[in-house]
Image (cartoon, rainbow, N blue to C red):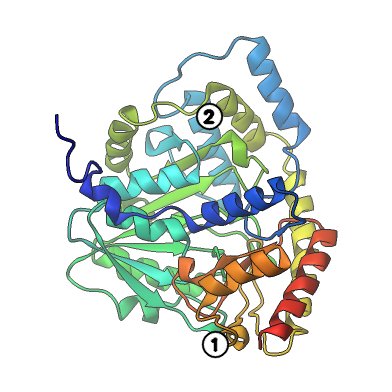
Amino acid sequence: MQAAANPIAERISTISVSSTSKVSAEAERLRSAGADVVDFGAGEPDFPTPDNIKQAAVRALEQNFTKYTATGGTAELKKAVCERHRLDFGTDYKPAECLVTVGGKHAIFNLTQALVNAGDEVIIPAPYWVTYKDVVNFAGGRCVFAETDEDAGFSVTAGLVERHLTARTRMVIVNSPSNPSGAVVERGEFEKIFRLTSERGIYLLTDECYSKFLYGSQPFSIASLAGARDTVAVAGSLSKTYAMTGWRIGYALAPEAVVGAMLKLQSHSTSNPASISQKAAVEALRGPQDSVTAMLAEYRRRRDFVVARLRQIPGVRCAEPEGAFYAYPNVSVAIGANGIRNTLQFSERLLAEAQVAVVPGEAFGTNRHVRISYATSMKELERGLERIHQFVARHS
């Protein structure tokens, strides 16, 4: 039998491999070959999962809690998600409006597939997290990128969103604090964005993955506003907040009909998240929250060091992150020299010549920046930033 000319489904061509995953894989390949790599690529806390959370998983194993659960998560965990969101942000979600997913990325994928039809427009402020573009494309939607101003700290405003609204706009995605820039949407502007979308029946997807890591403002959810539950969809994750990246627990809070559509999709893809991880997640949400405060204090210390050190490199500019754990410096001073045409080549050469892994700005919708994760030790930050300094000096 003759093989098909192209055995891969056409829809797969609409998406690309995650750039952050590619960087991590290449850094790991070099490490395995004996290279002394400093990895600023991964967006992963270097802190261990708190002991109380790990012990909850141990108890789950001892009690043989190792079977299937309900597809959308256990009743206990959905209730805990709603309780924690209420305590942190003043919302009033019910378990029927909650879906537990296999990480925050899964929640965003399911939400997008449930809400976006072919040809629908989705407004995505740039720079943006790499996955937004691909999940919209996979759904058959059209990405409308709203470029933020670096000189204004990459802030997202209602005016910026309004300029990109059309009759085809189905959804607006806001990530605050932002990956990759660390920018935080000012509360007043966020409320104006909500009014713009809600008055037009447009869904507002708020990605709250880094919502607890704010340096100069208090945690806030747009879902807490009156009437928000009709058109706001929350994507959340325990990965960053509780250093639980490998446990793969995320969640969505959305109108009950939207949750029902997501549940239908999840029932034919992943089914339930891991039972043991769900027990650990209940403890994370209901147990002590002091680990979050401790991580935030350390991230603040690292942020201050990283921004100051980057600004010591001649020609490099860096807006101060207001949240999350990323810096997004402008390295255009080294582009155009020695065959470096863009930040993709900058990042490749930096890894090959200086053994420092960063993520190129092209992955996030800009062409003059790289993303540096400072979720690593001060020793590694010092070593890596010195190497970046020397690399830029040689190529500018």
Q: On the picture, is 368 further left or further right than 218?
A: left
Visible residue check, residue 246: yes
First in sequence: mark 2 or mark 1?
Answer: 2
Position of residue 170 relative to residue 306, above or below, is: above
Q: Residue at x 61, y 81 (%)?
A: 331
Q: For mark 2, give the secondary structure.
A: helix
Q: Which residue is mark 2?
A: 77
**In this picture, is 74 found above or below 304?**
above
Q: Which residue is mark 1?
A: 336
Establish if 210 lies above or below 327: above
Closer to the camera, 13 or 376? 13
In percent of width and height, residue 171 lies at 30, 61
- Disc assigned to residue 33: none
Q: Quadrant of the N terminus?
A: top left
Q: Residue at x 70, y 19 (%)?
A: 58
Q: Amino acid at mark 1?
A: Gly
Where residue 204 sits, quadrant-wise, is: bottom left
Q: Residue at x 73, y 85 (%)?
A: 393
